[in-house]
Image (cartoon, grey):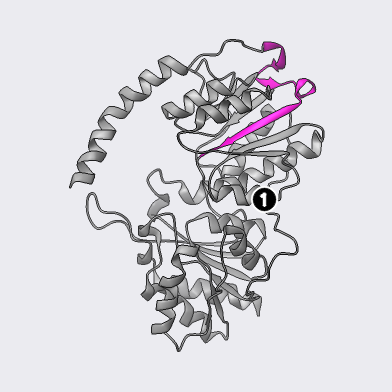
Amino acid sequence: MIRKLNRLFQDFFRPLRLGIGKKIWDRKNKKNLDTIKEEQIDMSKVKSIIFLRYDGKIGDMVINTLMFREIKKRFPNIKISVVARGAAVDIIKYNPYINSIYKYEKGKESELAAEIAKENYDVLVDFSEMLRVNQMKFINQCKAKVNIGLDKEEWELFDISITENRDYRNNEHITERYGAYLKKLGIKNFDKKYDIFLEKNKEEIDLNEGIILNPYGASKHKHFNSDTLRFIIEICNSLNKEVTLIYSPDKYKELKEFLDKNRDLKVILPENIRSILDSAEIIRNSEVVITPDTSIVHIASAFSKKIISVYPPNGGKYGVDHLVWGPLKLENKILFCREALGVGEEININTFNREEMKKRIMEVLGDCL
């Protein structure tokens, strides 16, 4: 109850807080109009670009990799830097198209902004749908010559806006939205493939060229429960396919307990997954990936794997989750769970149609036989 009241309190005051923050930080000392022609950057005047990806979202960073590559292919001398946070740093730590990575830490935004400002970046690219006050302040203090943002036409802080219904549509795949950013940078035709570069000569981890099952989503409501895990594994085992489970390091004990109770199943549980790149290495050597709606969908897409994924009903809150954030290839299989039972209740990812899941697995594995 206390948590719910606190959430209501925060929701009530958020618009006021954001409004005050915008009045303070929505300003830019100098408009570099000579770098912009007809809402497009003159790339002949650009030597450096910095991308802000401070939300720590792994899947978004995976998709962003197409932008780094496509810019570097056409403008190899441009310095590309990325502000990243948490496990998303791992996604780009070996990326050859990125010159430098700044690690974002809450509470230390001003120190980082001052460091970035010294580099005098020509272009700053932000992807936030809604800016919190500390993010407004951070962008202001980075002092890039040109700022590009999402749906920021009414902002002084931004020189160029990627605007819905003009530059992109909210029901298109996210690669189209990122393509709208690329067009502002003079790139019209681009390859949508994602990049994940893995560490060379690292300690080997247990690999299985078969079925990868990821039980975990972004929240507990998007986790496959033990009953769902057993159901999916039994189907794969019936087709003579062993299953490898992947996980974040804090979930190993939980999965070990599951396997101790289900010793009849043919399952591999790697003991040494320590980072998202370890999971990516396992996915790279797989045939099929089964996962709830999460970053693993995009990592599997990066390696062109066959994917079976489960999404919220009817495309989530805005009806477009599966369209915007689905697998890169349309032929991959998407299932939906059922609606929440009551008002205020969360969806349960385990309520997908089991017969449909069985059919999808048999179809995909049949293609692999």
Identify the image quadrant of residue 368.
Answer: bottom right
Residue drawn where x is 55% and y is 51% of the image:
87
* Above or below 174: residue 287: below
In the displayed structure image, the side of residue 284 where residue 308 appears, left or right: left
Does the rendering let one see residue 150?
no
Residue drawn where x is 53% and y is 20% of the image:
140
Residue drawn where x is 29% and y is 56% of the image:
340
Q: Position of residue 170 (x, y in %)?
A: 50, 38
Quarter of the C terminus within the rendering: bottom right
Q: Residue furthest left?
A: 1
Mark 1 = which residue? Answer: 194
State yes or no: residue 144 in magenta: no
Q: 10 Å neighbourhood of mark 1: few (<14), some, or many (≥20)?
A: many
Residue drawn where x is 68% and y is 71% of the image:
204
- Disc 1, SS: loop
Q: Position of residue 127 (x, y in %)?
A: 54, 34
* Above or below 39: residue 72: below
Does the rendering let one see residue 295?
yes
In the displayed structure image, the side of residue 237 where residue 95 appears, left or right: right
The amino acid at mark 1 is Tyr
Q: Position of residue 238 (x, y in %)?
A: 51, 86
Magenta span: 33-54
Q: Position of residue 328 (x, y in %)?
A: 61, 53
* Above or below 325: residue 164: above
Instruction: Give whichever of 345, 255 is nearer the camera.
Output: 255
In the displayed structure image, the side of residue 60 where residue 229 appears, left or right: left
* Above or below 61: residue 207: below
State yes or no: residue 52 in magenta: yes
Identify the image quadrant of residue 176.
Answer: top right
Instruction: Give whichever of 204, 330 is nearer the camera.
Output: 204
Picture mark count: 1
